[in-house]
Image (cartoon, grey):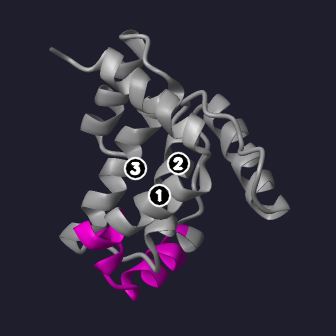
């Protein structure tokens, strides 16, 4: 379950008319913090981000499943979106406890500054120069003055 503060920040972003990916960013930030605090670990930065995005979809953020990625990932993301549309479904305690225990065995290096930086560079390299340039210009335009 996401923290109350995270839900409020995401709601605030929605009211300000920000993109669903920005709203989901709040959940990813929360997950990175959890790994850093030692609440649980993550095998990789990618896993920590995936957990955050899943939480966002389940919390009702209008984030569609990815177009790329494995069939399994797309299917799970679609399931998360459906869960986000329903309200008040009971979570399986046994399953929840199992995932928590599995994540507790993982390390916290996935949320280090170095790992996040490495992930960002890797993700940026996959994009075309035109795409990177567009998003940089958009960021500059929407930056607070």
Q: Which mark is residue 98?
A: none
Would residue 8 be found to the left or right of residue 67 on screen? left
Magenta residue check for 25? no
Secondary structure under tag 1 reads helix
Residue 5, image x and y in percent? Answer: 24, 36
Do the residues under discs 1 and 3 have CB atoms within 8 angstroms?
Answer: yes
The residue pinned by badge 3 equals 28
- Camera-side residue of 116 and 53: 116
Looking at the image, residue 81 lies above or below residue 74: above
Would residue 87 be found to the left or right of residue 51 on screen? right
The residue pinned by badge 1 equals 49
Magenta residue check for 100? yes
Would residue 59 be found to the left or right of residue 138 on screen? right
- Tell me the distance, in whole angstroms, between the alpha carbons under discs 2 and 1: 6 Å
Earlier along the polypeptide chain: callout 1 or callout 3?
A: 3
Q: Residue furthest right?
A: 71
Do the residues under discs 3 and 2 have CB atoms within 8 angstroms?
Answer: yes
Q: Please identify the quarter of the rendering in which residue 142 is found.
A: top left
What's drawn in magenta, residue-wise? 96-116
Say how many tags the image has.
3
Q: Residues within 10 Å of mark 1 (few under 14, many from 20)?
A: many
Do the residues under discs 2 and 1 have CB atoms within 8 angstroms?
Answer: yes
Q: Please identify the quarter of the rendering in which residue 70 is found.
A: bottom right
Main secondary structure along the magenta-highlighted residues: helix
Q: Quadrant of the C terminus?
A: top left
The residue pinned by badge 2 equals 53
């Amino acid at each position: 379950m996401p923290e109350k503060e995270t839900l409020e920040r995401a709601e605030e972003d929605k009211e300000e008319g920000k993109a669903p990916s920005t709203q989901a960013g709040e959940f990813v930030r929360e997950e990175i913090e959890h790994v850093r605090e030692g609440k649980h670990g993550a095998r990789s930065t990618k896993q920590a981000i995936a957990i955050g995005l899943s939480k966002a979809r389940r919390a009702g953020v209008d984030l569609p499943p990815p177009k790329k990625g494995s069939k399994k990932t797309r299917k799970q993301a679609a399931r998360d979106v459906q869960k986000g549309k329903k309200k008040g479904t009971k979570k399986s305690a046994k399953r929840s406890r199992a995932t928590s225990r599995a994540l507790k065995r993982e390390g916290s290096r996935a949320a280090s500054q170095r790992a996040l930086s490495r992930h960002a560079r890797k993700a940026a390299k996959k994009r075309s120069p035109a795409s990177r340039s567009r998003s940089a210009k958009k960021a500059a335009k929407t930056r607070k003055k």
